[in-house]
């Protein structure tokens, strides 16, 4: 594997209606020891977002894009901008607008670990509990879900570097050479959820390593709206609420994205099993939680 000696980095941040969070993120980037980077914010529907460029030590480009792009389209818009307008850039980092980066060596840690044939992310910890939210994602084939066995542990209880089956794009370093090899995220089939997993899975099939660092991390207040089947509905018509969530593409467990993802990533027999078994778990989970008032701890989704 080839180590990259000179990093020219562009950080891409899709932004939609959460501009209060992004100011904290931009301010934290001001204090990074690694300084050879620029920021590209793809604003696809935020009202009243303004940037005082004098407040920041790095260059910021604001791209005003359509609110119809969703997350995947906005991310691809940022990548295309970098490819077309910033030819000197050889790495991008995709960041969510709501993460917290407090360590001044955060970017430097990624740069030190960077390789031309690896996508690198880092673990996330809950900003309130300080417990690990995710650190390493492995496919459990017979349970049909991606598992992190480190969830809920303390930082000192985890190994140094984890090789994964997929990676999220909450703070993820991707070489431009890899993007040219695997293409863009799939905004047609996966406009909001699952596109990062499909993208990195596609890279792994091309012999690109997927690495999650534990030597640095992001802080996040994850409030998942995943349709796991374990959602407890307070409305009288619980089943109608469940169906609305199940078929609403704003929910990360919706059947459209799960189906599209499965048939993009897996061979068709396993994809059919993955979708069917996952849907069965959601239905059973809904019945158990909402009609028997029981929420099993290890009912995985």
Image (cartoon, rainbow, N blue to C red):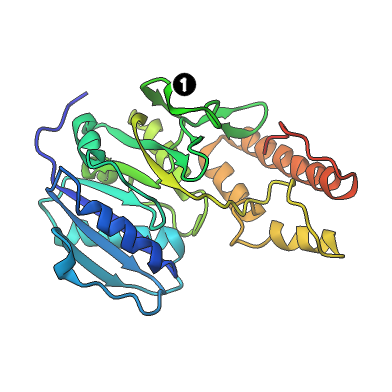
What residue is drawn where x is 40% and y is 46%? Answer: 169
Instruction: Please tell me in which quadrant of the rendered image residue 124 appears.
Output: top left
Please state the total of marks drawn on the protein image.
1
**Viewed as shown, does residue 119 lie left or right of 278?**
left
- Residue 130 vs 249, above or below: the answer is above
Question: In the picture provided, is 30 more to the left or to the right than 217?
Answer: left
Q: Residue at x 84, y 40 (%)?
A: 294
Residue 114 point in image, percent of width and height? 22, 33
Q: Residue at x 17, y 26 (%)?
A: 2
Q: Position of residue 241 (x, y in %)?
A: 77, 62
Quadrant assignment for the N terminus: top left
Q: Is residue 144 above or below residue 182?
A: above
Q: Nearer the viewer, residue 189 or 2?
A: 2
Location of residue 14 in the rendering, given as x and y in whole percent from the top left corner:
36, 61
Q: Secondary structure at mark 1?
A: helix
Q: Is residue 189 visible?
A: no
- In the figure, residue 178 lies in which quadrant? top left
Front in this rendered view, residue 47 or 45: 47
Mark yes or no: residue 52 visible: yes
Residue on which the image places disc 1: 157
Residue found 58% across the figure and 42% down from its top: 262
Q: Front-most of 171 and 247?
A: 171
- Residue density around tag 1, few if under 14, some if 14–19, many if 20 or more, within 10 Å: few
The quadrant of the rendering that contains the C terminus is top right
Whole-percent x, y for residue 273 in the image: 69, 35
């Amino acid at each position: 594997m080839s180590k990259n000696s000179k990093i020219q980095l562009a950080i891409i941040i899709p932004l939609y209606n959460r501009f209060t969070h992004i100011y904290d993120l931009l301010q934290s980037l001001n204090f990074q020891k690694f300084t050879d980077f620029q920021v590209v914010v793809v604003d696809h529907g935020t009202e009243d977002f303004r940037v005082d460029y004098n407040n920041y030590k790095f260059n910021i480009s604001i791209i005003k894009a359509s609110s119809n792009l969703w997350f995947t389209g906005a991310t691809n818009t940022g990548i295309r901008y970098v490819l077309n307008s910033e030819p000197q850039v050889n790495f991008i980092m995709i960041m969510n607008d709501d993460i917290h980066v407090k360590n001044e060596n955060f970017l430097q840690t990624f740069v030190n670990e960077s390789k031309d044939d690896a996508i690198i992310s880092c673990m996330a910890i809950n900003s309130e509990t300080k417990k690990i939210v995710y650190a390493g994602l492995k496919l459990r084939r017979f349970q049909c879900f991606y598992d992190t066995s480190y969830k809920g542990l303390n930082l000192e209880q985890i190994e140094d570097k984890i090789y994964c089956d997929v990676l999220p794009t909450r703070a993820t370093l991707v070489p431009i050479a890899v993007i040219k090899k695997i293409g863009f995220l799939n905004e047609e089939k996966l406009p909001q959820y699952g596109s990062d997993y499909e993208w990195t899975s596609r890279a792994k099939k091309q012999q690109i390593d997927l690495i999650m660092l534990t030597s640095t991390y992001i802080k996040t207040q994850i409030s998942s709206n995943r349709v796991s089947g374990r959602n407890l509905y307070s409305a009288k018509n619980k089943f109608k609420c469940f169906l609305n969530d199940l078929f609403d593409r704003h929910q990360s467990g919706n059947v459209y994205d799960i189906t599209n993802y499965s048939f993009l990533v897996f061979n068709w027999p396993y994809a059919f099993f993955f979708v069917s078994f996952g849907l069965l778990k959601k239905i059973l989970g809904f019945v158990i939680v909402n009609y028997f008032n029981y929420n099993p701890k290890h009912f995985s989704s």
